Each structure stands twice: as C-alpha cells, then as structure tokens.
Image: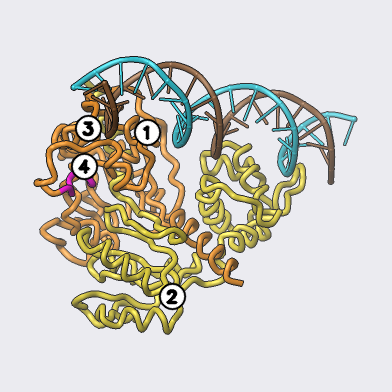
Chain colours: A yellow, B orange, C brown, D cyan
Amino acid sequence: MQRKEISKAVLKRLPGYLSYLKSIPEDAGPYISATGLANALGMGEVQVRKDLAMVSNGGRPKIGYLRESLIEDISQFLGYDNTTTAILVGAGKLGQALLGYTGFAAYGLNILAAFDIQPAAAEVEGKQIYPMEQLETFCRQNKVLMAIITVPVQNAQTVCDRLIRCGIKAVWNFAPTHLDVPKGILVQNENMATSLAVLSMHLQAQIKDKK
Amino acid sequence: MQRKEISKAVLKRLPGYLSYLKSIPEDAGPYISATGLANALGMGEVQVRKDLAMVSNGGRPKIGYLRESLIEDISQFLGYDNTTTAILVGAGKLGQALLGYTGFAAYGLNILAAFDIQPAAAEVEGKQIYPMEQLETFCRQNKVLMAIITVPVQNAQTVCDRLIRCGIKAVWNFAPTHLDVPKGILVQNENMATSLAVLSMHLQAQIKDKK
DNA sequence: TAGATTGTTAATCGATTAACAATC
DNA sequence: TAGATTGTTAATCGATTAACAATC
C-alpha cells in the first residue's frame, strides 16, 4: 500500500498510532487490532482501519496487524527513518528548551545548531549557539532544509526571508504570526494561540453551565 | 451575531485574525475589509467573511469592518477579556519556558504557579514552583480550572488523573501521549509530533522531486 | 450611478461514518 | 463452523467555495 495520496487529516493521526504502538509492552503479544488501537486512543475503529490501510500492507482478519511491521511501516512512511537535519533560530527560553529536548531523535529530527543575534550562552546540551552572521555559511555547508523559528514576532518574517535565501524548504514557526513565503516552501505553525482558543472556549462554556 | 454554534475549524482561525488586526499600525485607517484580511493572511476572502459573520455584528458594504470593534468582538468571543487562571505541572525546560512566557497575558491566560516532584528552582520570572504535595490545596483554594501538563510521558496520565480530582476541567497537554479523561473534561494536545509529521512529509517530497 | 464590499444561499469538495462482503 | 476482524463501497456529515443578491 505504498505512496497513495495521503490527506493531511490522516497524516496528523499517524504519529499518535506510532507513539501508542511503541508504548505497548513487549509481552503483550505480537498482534494488535484496529479495534484495540481505537479503544486505547479514543477513536473510531473504522477510522483507524482506514488510516492504517494507507500505510501498512494489511492485517490479518481475526488477528490484527503485526505490531512490529506497523511501527516500521508508519515510521518509514513518515520519514522517521532517514534523519532530517534542522537549525533553530532564536535561542531564547523556548528556543533553548527545544534545542535541549532529546526526544526529537525519535522523530528523525536532528537540530544541528542554533543561531541568535546575541547568543546568551555558547551552547545548550552540547548544541552550539552561533551568532546570526554565520547562518548562511552554516546552512549551505550542511545542506540544511528545515529551520525552527523561535524569535520574537517582530523579527519572524525577516528571519524567515533570510532562511529561505539560505535554501530552507520547511519552516517550523513558533512565532505567533503569519509568515509569507513563496510557493514550494512549507510553514508549519506551532500555534499556541489556537490551542488556547479551544481551551478558553471550553472553559467559558463550563462556567456558563454552572450559572 | 452573538453565540451561534461555532465550529472548531472557525474557532481555530479566530486567533489568527485577532493577532493580525492588532498588528496593523494605528495610522492605517479605522476600517479593514475581509478582502484585506484574507490577502494578508493568505486565505480565501469568503472564508474570512463567513468567519467574521460568526463573531461580529457586521461590516459595512464598500467600507469593511471597524477594526476596533472587530478586535473587541473576537477577544470577547474567545473569552480573552476575562482572565483564565491556570497552573503548570512539570517545571522542566519546556515547563519553565512556558512559565516565563509573558505573552499569555494577551490571551487572558494567567499561570499562577508551577508544580514539580522536585523543584529545581524556587521560582521562574516571579512564578513560584511548589512541590507536588501542595497541588490539591492550591487548586482548591484558587479554584483553578485549567492545567498545563509538561511532565515526561510516563507520568502524564497519573498527573492528569490527579488534576481532575482537583477540579480541573481543561488540560493543555504537552506530553506526547494520549490522555484518558472522563466526559466533560477537555484535553488539548499540543502535539509537536503532528507538526513534525507534516514537515517531514513535505521534505521527503522535496528530496524525491530532486532525484 | 458604478463599483466595492457584505452576507446569504446553493454547490462542491473532502473527510468521517455506516454497511457489508471477504477472510481466516 | 462461528465469530472476530479486515478492507471496501456507499451514505452521511461538515466545511469550504462559488454564485449572487443586497447595500452603501
């Protein structure tokens, strides 16, 4: 079932399956059913089955999917097998938190280094923080395709433009602002405001119910 | 146009409008059209107009919407006017970054304090970090309804259960795992893995195109 | 008036869910 | 065999887009 056109909705659910599959204890038996997955993650079983059909080469009726293969299939599909190298721009609090986070390796993401106008430290968890001047050279030399933006809002667009001139093709944007980019460049917004809106709405409803 | 049933899709777009509206310079004139907004944010103008219709009480044909009112309407709709108090559990790197982030005030979010099994520091940016033992008392005393979870994956569910017993109704979950909660409790996952999947996919396609 | 813009109604598109046949 | 499960086809649902009338 390789390389069908996959929808973004499905794509976004795959990491959830993967992380759950990896968390299952070894002694739980080699098989897992779509039903089992669905229950564990609070989803519909048909949806799980359809999603899995996009990436796996099938399960066995009455038995389910071989867990190992499923993990391998999803990992491969998401490209977690081949490491992506990235750089981070803006080594403030959030930037340093991301820089020091060791969990990204599991997603095939390797943050090579960080850049800042005025590096407050030389390195975080062994990752160097360079002054902005060295950005271009570093990106070219290391053929970096992905950048993480953790600079203040007012600098985000300028930094983004500069990154694109360095050959960056994908931007993970933590600055709460819209970034204008040419076609072919992907901006993924890690938008905390969005999440907060959903939460805030829920709480408002809660409070109103109480009255 | 108050309090129609609003879809999650619309809700998630509102913060984007709001932040853009706030960023417009004062001297740009008091009106903004849906077309203008759409172009600035790279969206369809009909979509913007429909979204705005959900929260505002209308614009004027040929002129547009009064920017001030629009800001006020969206802010109020999202509940940014009345402050939500929250606590944070897990004062590691990410937890401290969030704790020290001053931008949340603009979203009506006030993180009162943080909790950790073993507080590494007494406070961050003036926000106290307490040992976990004091969680229950604090939540009850301050009538906290929202919690931010930034603990390691393996502790997330336990912490979540404990929070719910404290009266928490909304959870902002930064631990990359599914949380099981009773009905009526909202979990909003800040799922970095999801974003990474989208980015990773894009880069894979990029690399393949090159070949 | 003409034209830009709003706001609504209808059409399209995409994603989820339901129904069911196939399989072990 | 019976029953659990897969996988596919059809139906439903929801959200986006297009078309158009209303308005200033």
Q: Amino acid at mark 4?
A: Cys
Residue designated by label 4: B139
- In front: B169, or B70? B70
- In front: B23, or A14? B23
Residue designated by label 1: B46
Name the image quarter holding residue B32: top left
Label 2 element class: loop
Q: Residue at x 25, y 65 (%)?
A: A151
Q: Is residue A29 visible?
A: no
Q: Amino acid at mark 1?
A: Val
In the drawing, does residue B105 fall left or right of residue B3? left
Could you confirm whether marks 2 and 3 are on the same chain? no
Q: Nearer the viewer, mark 3 or mark 4?
A: 3
**Spatial distance from mark 2 to mark 3, Cα to Cα?**
43 Å
Residue designated by label 2: A144
Residue designated by label 3: B64
